[in-house]
Structures are given as structure tokens and as C-alpha cells.
Image (cartoon, rainbow, N blue to C red):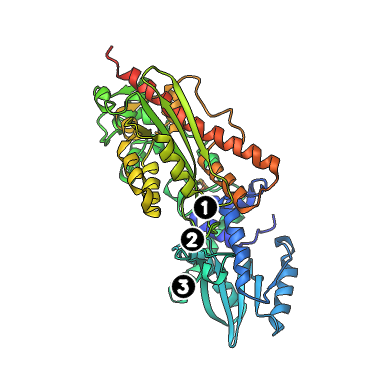
């Protein structure tokens, strides 16, 4: 077996978990185009935009599988003094092959820039930057600056196009890299050993699986775990996990009765072990201010990394859609909805239509999390002339999530209190499976952002997505109606 080479992404994977590195190389998943709005998609888009800061820069176009050609092209561009910057510059040192986002020519050498789509420099960004600095140092490149180019969260879009130099922030990280660069050659041997193995290295799934990145092999590594694996227990502390490991307990249903559990953990253990749901004796009291009659409200919002509208910032939350069910005292259910046009900042219309729809009644407005309240407060701050009616809406909000979290647990919740887990468990036959195009908030946000940015402009596709958005948001408020009805039934004596 030829020894696989290392890259930036393999090095970062190896730092997180040697098993992940092995799987990434020996059992790679089929390539899929990154989903619109996914971190990879955003990272690629921000990387392309960053090149606009370096006028006259030249892209090394050779793909990863033509690395030797890319290295030769990079060397030629470095020898050409008319080239001020090189994008995707390629280098090799022993078995490490990498591409540098931007290599900027300086009077006395070169500057290395790593582009990140985050709003600042994070600790783990320094690891792949250190690997690059180490390899370039070994290749004899005189590095005069090592920088991270990230999104400037203080940037506010003005009229017209994005001001790219203002959109990005450059941070010199040279000072913080010395220790990590020293660590690079110390870490590489373990990665080579792991890669050279013919069999999959063992690693017990744990905290490393989500830090700093969610590992794509989670399902692979947990496929032999019990359905009620102890790691699924909400709020399980490291000390609890260690003690359960020492006791040889891997299933929640096997946790001994005298094992110290906190909060709702013992209730979950008992419900899973017995298969019986838990309902707090005071559920009726907890529901007293929720009606019915009642309103059920849900928002969808997007957080575009590149601001789409004048006056907005990177990653600013912009609500664009609401759904409202109203359950009358006689049991009739009415639905209303708003989905903003995409050509203007949606917030003003969103707020005005919501105020009009909720009217002057004093019915409780049931939500499922504090998210709606947070967005309403932001809208009140943005539009002072609407602050008074928004304050009235906030005053009427009644959050059902703490009631579910504190007073109810069904084994079918699958260790989650999300509305998508709770509603189907409490209301047989209710679900989201028939929603094909948009079935969660991430997909809703990505769909609206793509239409707003112009990436999706085909009228038929736009019409289809808008219909899917309306159907999805309506399903979320209908889920609240179902959950509320089920809770009322559970609270009935006998
Ligand atoms: S899921 Fe966890 S244990 Fe498995 S490869 Fe990924 S990081 Fe390692």
C-alpha cells in the first residue's frame, strides 16, 4: 500500500482524532456538492471573495490531483515579480502537500494568509495555519507575515455593492504560532503511523467527536452502541460518563438506581427502562396560562454571511417568515402566514404584518423556545415606532418548551425536547416526513437566502421553494397545536 500523503484537512482531522484521519483517507465518503449555506459552501464563497482584495493576484488552477503541476506553477508565479499575490499556492514538504489560500508578495519576502468565514480568529484556526507556516519555512519561503483573513463583524453594508476591503479583517497571528509550529513535526509521526495501519484504529466516541468540528463519521463509530447509549443522556457530565464507563454501563436503562443523576436524568432513565412515559403531577398547573383559546407562533430567519441588504451586518439574523395558528374557544383552528419578498430587507414588513395579524386580543401566544422573543426584541430596537405594539406581543408570549422539558418525558422523545421529536411522540400520525423540499430551519434559511441573493432566480423554482417554505413553517405551528392538545389531555386527572 502506497503511503498516503498529508494535507491541511487531514492534519486537522488527525489532531481531532487519529481514527477520523484514517477513515477520511481509507474510507472516504462519496463526494457531494456542499449544500447551499452549509459551512463548506460558505467557506468556499468567502474564499473566492477574499481574492478581490488582492488586485492582480493569480489563481493556481491545477486541481488537487495535479499537485506536482500546481507546485511548479506556484514556483513560476513566485519568480515573476509582476505577480502581487498567488491564490491556492501549492507546496510539498516530504509527505505533506498543501495549498495556501493567499500568498502575498512583500518587498522582502511573502505573507501567508489563511481565509476563514468566521467573525474572528479561533484557537483551532491556528493549527492548520501553523502547518502551512511550517511547510513554507521548510521550503525556504521567507515569510514576513502570517495572517488570518476573517469576516469583519462590524461591517455594515452601504448602498450598492459590498466594500470587500471593509468586509474583511486581517489579523496577524505570527506571535501565537511559535509553539504550534514546534508541535507540527512532533505530531506528524503519529498521523503517519495511523495512516499506515491496515486496520481501522480504535477510538471511543466522546467529546472529541464534536470539537472543534462535528465528525462526519459519528454514525459509523456509534453503529454498535445501544439505542439508549449513555452518551445520549442529556447534560451528562464528563465525571458521570467516566464513572459509568468504569462501571461498565453503556445503556441508560442499565444505570443503577443508586447512581447519582441530576435534574431530569433519573426520570429519563426510568422512562427508558420501563418504557412508560413520565408526566409531572403539576402539569395542569404549569399549563394554566396557555389557553386555549390561544395563538401558536413560529418564525424563520436567515443569517447571511455576506449582507444582502443595505444597513445589515454579516451573519445578522433577519426574520423573513412567520406562521400563526389561532385556536378559538369553540375548537376551530385558523391559519395565517407571512413570507417576505426577497428584494428588500424583510424585517419591516415582517413586523408590521405580524402586529396586524396578532391584533389587539389578549390571547396567549404560544411559542416553542425563547427564539421568537429574542427576534421581537431585536425588531423593537430596529424600529422604535413599532416598539410599543411589539412589547405587547412579547408580554403575551407563553413558551411551551420549558413545560415539556420540565414536566414530560416519553421514551419516543429520543432524548430530545425539540418540537420535531416531541410532536410525533405525543401525537400519533403527526410528522414532517412528507415535507420533501424543506423540512428544517437550516434548509428554510438557505432557500430564502439563495433566492434573496439571486442564486435561485428561475420563476418556477422560486415558486416551488416559496410554497415549500410556507408548508414547512405552517407545520411547525401545527406541531405546537398538537403538542399543546396532547399536554392538556395528559394533565387531565385519571
Ligand atoms: S466519530 Fe469520534 S471517534 Fe469516530 S472518528 Fe470521528 S472523532 Fe473519532
Observer-nearest residue: 464 or 236? 464
- The answer to whether residue 192 is seen in the rendering is no
Distance, label 1 to label 2, CA atoms, is 9 Å
Q: Quadrant of residue 425?
A: top left
Q: Which residue lies under the disc numbered 2?
A: 311
Measuring from the top left, give residue 107's x and y in whole percent: 59, 87
Neighbour tally class for label 3: few under 14, some 14-19, many 20 plus, Cα within 10 Å:
some
Q: Is residue 108 left or right of residue 362?
A: right
Residue 79 falls in image quadrant: bottom right
Q: Are marks 3 and 1 in contact (CB under 8 Å)?
A: no
Q: Is residue 268 above or below residue 45?
A: above
Q: Is mark 2 within 8 Å of ligand 1?
A: no
Residue extending furthest toward the top = 494
Query: Residue 284 in the image: x percent, y percent?
Result: 27, 22
Alpha-carbon span between mark 3 and mark 1:
41 Å
Pointer 1 or 2: first along the chain: 2
Q: Nearer the viewer, mark 2 or mark 3?
A: 2
For label 1, the SS is: loop
Numbered disc 2: secondary structure: loop
In contact (CB < 8 Å): disc 1 and disc 2: yes
Residue 61 visible in this rendered orientation of the protein:
yes
Residue that badge 1 annotates: 345
Mark sitting earlier along the chain (2/3): 3
Is the C-beta of the residue carrying label 3 under 8 Å from the nearest atom of ligand 1? Answer: no
Q: Is residue 143 above or below residue 492?
A: below
What residue is pinned by disc 3?
Answer: 177
Q: Position of residue 400 (x, y in %)?
A: 35, 32
Give the camera-side residue of 22 and 55.
55
Amino acid at each position: 500500500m502506497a503511503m498516503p500523503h498529508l494535507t491541511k484537512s487531514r492534519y486537522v482531522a488527525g489532531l481531532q482524532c487519529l481514527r477520523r484521519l484514517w477513515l477520511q483517507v481509507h474510507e472516504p465518503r462519496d463526494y457531494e456538492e456542499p449544500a447551499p449555506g452549509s459551512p463548506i459552501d460558505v467557506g468556499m464563497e468567502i474564499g473566492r471573495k477574499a481574492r478581490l482584495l488582492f488586485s492582480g493576484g493569480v489563481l493556481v488552477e491545477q486541481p488537487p490531483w495535479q499537485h506536482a503541476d500546481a507546485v511548479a506553477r506556484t514556483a513560476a508565479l513566485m519568480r515573476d515579480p509582476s505577480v502581487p499575490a498567488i491564490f491556492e499556492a501549492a507546496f510539498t514538504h516530504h509527505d505533506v502537500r498543501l495549498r495556501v489560500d493567499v500568498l502575498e508578495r512583500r518587498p522582502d519576502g511573502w505573507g501567508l494568509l489563511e481565509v476563514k468565514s468566521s467573525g474572528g480568529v479561533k484557537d483551532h484556526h491556528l493549527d492548520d495555519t501553523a502547518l502551512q507556516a511550517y511547510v513554507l519555512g521548510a521550503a525556504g519561503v521567507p515569510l514576513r507575515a502570517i495572517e488570518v483573513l476573517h469576516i469583519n463583524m462590524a461591517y455594515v453594508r452601504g448602498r450598492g455593492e459590498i466594500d470587500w476591503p471593509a468586509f474583511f479583517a486581517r489579523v496577524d497571528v505570527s506571535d501565537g504560532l511559535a509553539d504550534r509550529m514546534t508541535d507540527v513535526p512532533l505530531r506528524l509521526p503519529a498521523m503517519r503511523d495511523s495512516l499506515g495501519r491496515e486496520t481501522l484504529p480504535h477510538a471511543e466516541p466522546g467529546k472529541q467527536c464534536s470539537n472543534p468540528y462535528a465528525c462526519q463519521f459519528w454514525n459509523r463509530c456509534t453503529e454498535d452502541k445501544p439505542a439508549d447509549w449513555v452518551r445520549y443522556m442529556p447534560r451528562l457530565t464528563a465525571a458521570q460518563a467516566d464513572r459509568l464507563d468504569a462501571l461498565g454501563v453503556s445503556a441508560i436503562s442499565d444505570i443503577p438506581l443508586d447512581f447519582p443523576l441530576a435534574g431530569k436524568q433519573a426520570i429519563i432513565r426510568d422512562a427508558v427502562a420501563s418504557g412508560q412515559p413520565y408526566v409531572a403531577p403539576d402539569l395542569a398547573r404549569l399549563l394554566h396560562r396557555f389557553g386555549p383559546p390561544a395563538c401558536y407562533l413560529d418564525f424563520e430567519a436567515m443569517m447571511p454571511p455576506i449582507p444582502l441588504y443595505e444597513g445589515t451586518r454579516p451573519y445578522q439574523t433577519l426574520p423573513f417568515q412567520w406562521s400563526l395558528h389561532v385556536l378559538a374557544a369553540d375548537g376551530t383552528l385558523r391559519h395565517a402566514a407571512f413570507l417576505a419578498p426577497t428584494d428588500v430587507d424583510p424585517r419591516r414588513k415582517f413586523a408590521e404584518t405580524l402586529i396586524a395579524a396578532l391584533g389587539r386580543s389578549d390571547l396567549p401566544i404560544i411559542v416553542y423556545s425563547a427564539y421568537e422573543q429574542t427576534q421581537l426584541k431585536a425588531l423593537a430596537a430596529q424600529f422604535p415606532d413599532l416598539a410599543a405594539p411589539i412589547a405587547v406581543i412579547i408580554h403575551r408570549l407563553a413558551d411551551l418548551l420549558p413545560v415539556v422539558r420540565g414536566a414530560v418525558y416519553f421514551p419516543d422523545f429520543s432524548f430530545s425536547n425539540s418540537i420535531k421529536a416531541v410532536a410525533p411522540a405525543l401525537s400519533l400520525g403527526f410528522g414532517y416526513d412528507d415535507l420533501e423540499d424543506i423540512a428544517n430551519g437550516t434548509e428554510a434559511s438557505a432557500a430564502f437566502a439563495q433566492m434573496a441573493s439571486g442564486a435561485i432566480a428561475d420563476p418556477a423554482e422560486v415558486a416551488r421553494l416559496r410554497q415549500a417554505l410556507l408548508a414547512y413553517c405552517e407545520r411547525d405551528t401545527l406541531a405546537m397545536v398538537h403538542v399543546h392538545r396532547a399536554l392538556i389531555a395528559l394533565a387531565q386527572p385519571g
